[in-house]
């Protein structure tokens, strides 16, 4: 089988995303990846050196095509703080619960202990998220310095979603996060 062109490779990554997102790296079997992508093991290993290599490419695809794209979409189409609130709440709100995928794949990758191969990719994604948060805060007249706290709250939200999964409780948590943002002039601390 010839190397896939960019479109074919993106399709493979998009199809492999679902089992990794639903089950995590450890919980995803080769059989599940074969079924999702429509490729046999030989073809998968022809395009990716191993399962971890495929996961790394899937995670990069997710960060660029899902996570940062969603943040940028809300930032372009909504007022700054509303864009952040939507970014937070759409990470767990889905019209069709069958399509729910357990929060953020980036946060899942952080918790699965892929430090050996994924740390640089995860760090770069975290920096980009924090920059997006900082830019939205600045546009709203809030201190950019609170972007790290927002990032921490986003990660906590994703972990909470795994544990409680109650949209109502998660909505209240998101409301408290954004209600606690101080005005830039007040200089009050976000706790």
Image: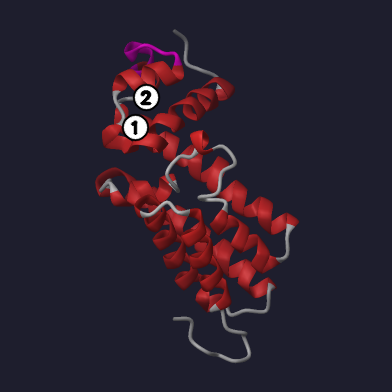
Query: Considering the numbered disc 2 on the image, is that residue within a helix, a strand or a loop?
Result: loop
User: Which residue is pictured at 42% across the width and 44% down the height?
Assistant: 102
Q: Quadrant of the N terminus?
A: top left
Give the labeled residue for mark 2: 48
**Numbered disc total:** 2
- Image marks 1 and 2: residues in contact by CB distance under 8 Å: yes
Q: Position of residue 157 (x, y in %)?
A: 44, 60
Query: CA–CA distance between discs 1 and 2?
Result: 6 Å
The magenta segment is 38-45
Q: Which mark is residue 53?
A: 1
Q: Position of residue 6 (x, y in %)?
A: 56, 25
User: Which residue is pictured at 45% across the width and 14% down the height?
Assistant: 38
Q: Main secondary structure of the magenta part?
A: helix
Q: Which image quarter: residue 101?
A: top left
In the image, is residue 110 above or below residue 9? below
Mark 2 closeness class: few <14, some 14–19, many ≥20 residues within 10 Å: some
Between residue 19 and residue 7, name the one nearer to us.
19
What's the colour scheme? secondary structure
Q: Which mark is residue 128?
A: none
Residue furthest to the bottom in view is: 186
In the image, is residue 45 above or below residue 147? above
Q: Position of residue 106 (x, y in %)?
A: 42, 48
User: Quick check: is 147 in the magenta stretch?
Assistant: no
Mark 1 closeness class: few <14, some 14–19, many ≥20 residues within 10 Å: some
User: Which residue is pictured at 46% across the width and 53% down the height?
Assistant: 125
Q: Quadrant of the C terminus?
A: bottom left
Query: Considering the numbered disc 1 on the image, is that residue within a helix, a strand or a loop?
Result: helix
> Is tag 1's residue or tag 2's residue first in the polypeptide sequence?
2
Between residue 125 and residue 158, name the one nearer to us.
158
User: Which residue is pictured at 38% across the width and 13% down the height?
Assistant: 43
């Amino acid at each position: 089988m010839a190397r896939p062109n960019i479109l074919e490779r993106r399709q493979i990554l998009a199809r492999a995303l679902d089992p990794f997102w639903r089950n995590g790296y450890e919980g995803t079997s080769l059989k599940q990846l074969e079924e999702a992508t429509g490729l046999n093991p030989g073809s998968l290993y022809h395009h990716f050196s191993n399962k971890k290599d495929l996961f790394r490419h899937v995670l990069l695809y997710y960060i660029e095509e899902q996570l940062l794209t969603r943040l940028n979409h809300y930032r372009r189409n909504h007022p700054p703080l509303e864009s952040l609130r939507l970014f937070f709440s759409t990470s767990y709100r889905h019209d069709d619960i069958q399509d729910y995928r357990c929060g953020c794949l980036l946060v899942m990758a952080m918790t699965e202990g892929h430090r050996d191969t994924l740390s640089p990719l995860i760090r770069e994604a975290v920096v980009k998220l924090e920059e997006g948060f900082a830019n939205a805060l600045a546009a709203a007249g809030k201190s950019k310095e609170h972007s790290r706290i927002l990032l921490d709250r986003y990660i906590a939200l994703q972990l909470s979603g795994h544990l409680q999964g109650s949209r109502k409780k998660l909505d209240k948590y998101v409301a408290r996060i954004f209600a606690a943002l101080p005005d830039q002039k007040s200089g009050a601390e976000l706790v």
